[in-house]
Image (cartoon, rainbow, N blue to C red):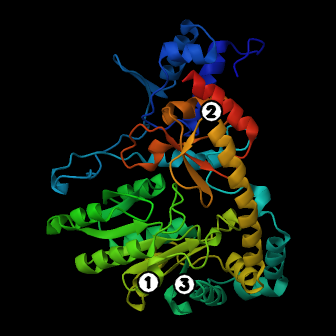
Amino acid sequence: MLTRTSTQSLTEQLADRFSERIRTRLLAPGARLPSVRECARQQGVSPHTVVAAYDQLLAQGLVEARRQRGFYVRDSIAAQAGPALSTIGGPISEQPAAKLVPADASTLIRGMFHRPSDKPQPGMGVFPSEWLDSPFTAAAVRRMTSTRALQDFSLQYGEPAGDGGLRRSLATKLANINVPAGPEQVVTTVGATHALDIVSRTLLRAGDAVMVEEPGWALEFARLEALGMRILPVPRKADGPDLEVMERYCDAGDGHKPKLFVSVSVLHNPTGYSLTPGSAHRVLQLANKHNFHIVEDDTYSHLAPEHATRLSALDGLQRTVYVSGFAKILAPNWRIGFLAASPALVGRMLETKLLTTLTTPSLFERALAWCIDQGQLRRHAERVRLRLDGARGRTVKLALAAGCTLASEPAGLFGWVDTGVDTDALTQRMLDEGYLLAPGSLFHARRPPSTLMRINFATAQDAAFWKVFARVKAQL
């Protein structure tokens, strides 16, 4: 909070606060600063102080003043017009051009590295580090860093497809969820995001249309847009994607037919929905009828039951490509992900990997294989799921008491919560209190205003947060 006992003036403190948020992308390019009057009310200072602080930001080149509209964060890189985004309804070719701002998508991610405070952060996308702290990971790394082991693999490139032992372990793990893939059909990657990028670069070309679930993860929207793809948002319902919207996209002219559908079928981010068998079969029927591929992002597989419906299991990896990783459940900094594809596609995926990273580090891949083979990962995941169940129950009670409603049945790591107020404005006010939120607009391709927000059940079970939340919400 601003303080009158500081060696800095109130103007300097306020300018420094906004400057830090802009430089760390907690305020993304294009974001509107509060009006002078609103900022003065929020911070308890005079309008003159706010004007002087905004003048400092203008002088630093961090913001720009738009006549009769207010102050906006400047984009330091001149944005070129992006490919057209489709809206639901109307021919795709008639849609107006629009631009996704990748910085918007990275705002929350940057928050992982520039936390606004040491308080629990309800908007974060990962478990608290203490939840993941287990002695077996250190033991696994020690086994792999003995003198003999280092001589065996550290002084030469690893296998292009990834460590053979890990790929065998992953093939067994996939068999447990009925996804048929031998070790030769598995390619390891630098996290699940890298796997998604490999799939996109292999199957798509600039200008291709890609169906994505909405709400969905903004990083995926921005990544595809940066590759020059046409993004076709598909509303995500409780049982799966809106099939009527998908059908409408597929019936477009040949130049606009979708080439790919990206889906989080199990414990969808941010809603927590899981695909039903009936919906899964109809999605696969559409894919076969209209000749598009499906990439199934199963990032949250370790939190879901093995019998959960997965497109890759029903399809047998014919039109599907399976993607997953271990950052959510084990060790984010190990950066291990993987993909599994049909024999006809896996060679092409491997070529793309070779063009981007050559190989992936064997040390952590072998350590992960040991964790899987010894049953350590399975037991660890069971403990995390049990702990998450308790946190979910506590968080739901706190959210309801704070005047929120649940927009979807609580499941998995994330809750999709309706606050009843504009969560973009709420997010900026909560930053002043040291909390990073994930506003609903972040999960839509066009970022419309929203009263929804995503919460992390593991980090939002803090009564102190909800007390501050209720106070700030009442002020809005």
At 62% from the left edge and 17% from the top edge, which residue is drawn? 43
Judge depth for marks 1 and 2 and give the one in front.
1
At 53% from the left edge and 85% from the top edge, which residue is drawn? 186
- Which percent across, then down, holds residue 16? 63, 25
Tag 1 and tag 3, C-beta contact below 8 Å: no
53 displayed left or right of 227 = right
Label 1, residues with CA under 10 Å away: few <14, some 14-19, many ≥20: some
Question: Label 3 to label 2, Cα distance in Å?
Answer: 44 Å
Rendered position, 431 above or below 355 = above
| Chain-order first, disc 3 or disc 2 | 3
Rendered position, 378 above or below 328 = below
Identify the mark at residue 431; answer none if there is no mark: 2
User: Can the viewer see residue 124 in this picture?
Assistant: yes
* Residue kind at label 1, given as amino acid type: Leu
| Chain-order first, disc 1 or disc 3 | 3
Identify the mark at residue 314; answer none if there is no mark: 1
